[in-house]
């Protein structure tokens, strides 16, 4: 089993999209019993809402933490401590969308060798950095 730890803080809209992209409804060639998603949210004034949390698939778990230090490291460590998988994937920034074959590809890569390390680069869409804009024009 693959455990995916997603750290979230103060970004419910982006995190919801990330979690959807990790769901078995979006992912191809993989079923819910092959991986789990551990959502670790450091408390903010803008947490994921209850409707989003109720809609999480069965292979997702949600953990809200109170963190006083400005670092995701404790959330990552917590996620790793509750993980059930033999391999752990870490997404430190919950504002990521993954491609539909990512989860099955990572699982296949780990089957190639016992100590496989998989790294997935992040890319921005468009010609300019997205963090420069608060919203996108249509």
Image (cartoon, rainbow, N blue to C red):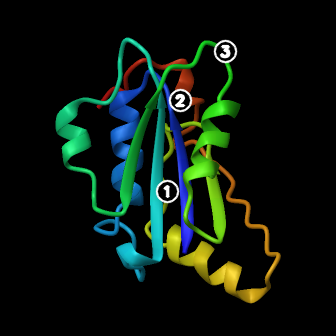
Discs 1/2, front: 1
Q: Residue at x 82, y 76 (%)?
A: 115
Alpha carbon separation for disc pair 1 and 3: 28 Å
Q: How many marks?
A: 3
Closer mark to the observer between disc 1 and disc 3: 3
Which of the two residues, 62 or 29, is positioned nearer the viewer here? Answer: 62
The residue closer to the viewer here, 27 or 114, is 114
- Which residue is rendered at x = 42% and y = 58% of the image? 22
**x and y percent of residue 71 in the render?**
68, 23
Of tags 3 and 2, which is closer to the observer? 3
The answer to whether marks 1 and 3 mark residues whose Cβ atoms lie closer than 8 Å is no
Residue under label 1, please give it: 98
Asked if 115 appears above or below 57 in the picture, the reply is below
Residue 24 lies, in percent from the top left, at 34, 69
Q: Earlier in the sequence, mark 3 or mark 2?
A: 3
Marks 1 and 2: CB-CB under 8 Å?
A: no
* First along the sequence among labels 1 and 2: 1
Task: Identify the disc placed on residue 24.
Answer: none
- Residue 130's disc is 2
| Mark 1 neighbour density, 10 Å: few (under 14) some (14–19) many (20 or more) | some
Disc 3 secondary structure class: loop
The extreme right residue here reads 115
Q: Position of residue 48 (x, y in %)?
A: 32, 30
């Amino acid at each position: 089993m693959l455990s995916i730890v997603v750290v979230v803080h103060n970004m419910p809209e982006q995190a919801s999209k990330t979690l959807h992209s990790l769901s078995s409804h979006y992912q191809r060639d993989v079923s819910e019993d092959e991986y789990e998603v551990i959502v670790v949210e450091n408390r903010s004034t803008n947490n994921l809402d209850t409707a989003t949390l109720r809609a999480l698939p069965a292979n997702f778990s949600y953990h809200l933490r109170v963190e006083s230090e400005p670092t995701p490291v404790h959330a990552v460590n917590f996620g790793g401590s509750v993980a059930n998988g033999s391999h752990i994937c870490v997404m430190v920034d919950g504002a990521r969308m993954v491609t539909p074959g990512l989860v099955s590809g990572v699982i296949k890569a780990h089957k190639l060798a016992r100590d496989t390390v998989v790294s997935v680069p992040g890319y921005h869409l468009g010609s300019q950095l997205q963090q420069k804009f608060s919203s996108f024009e249509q």
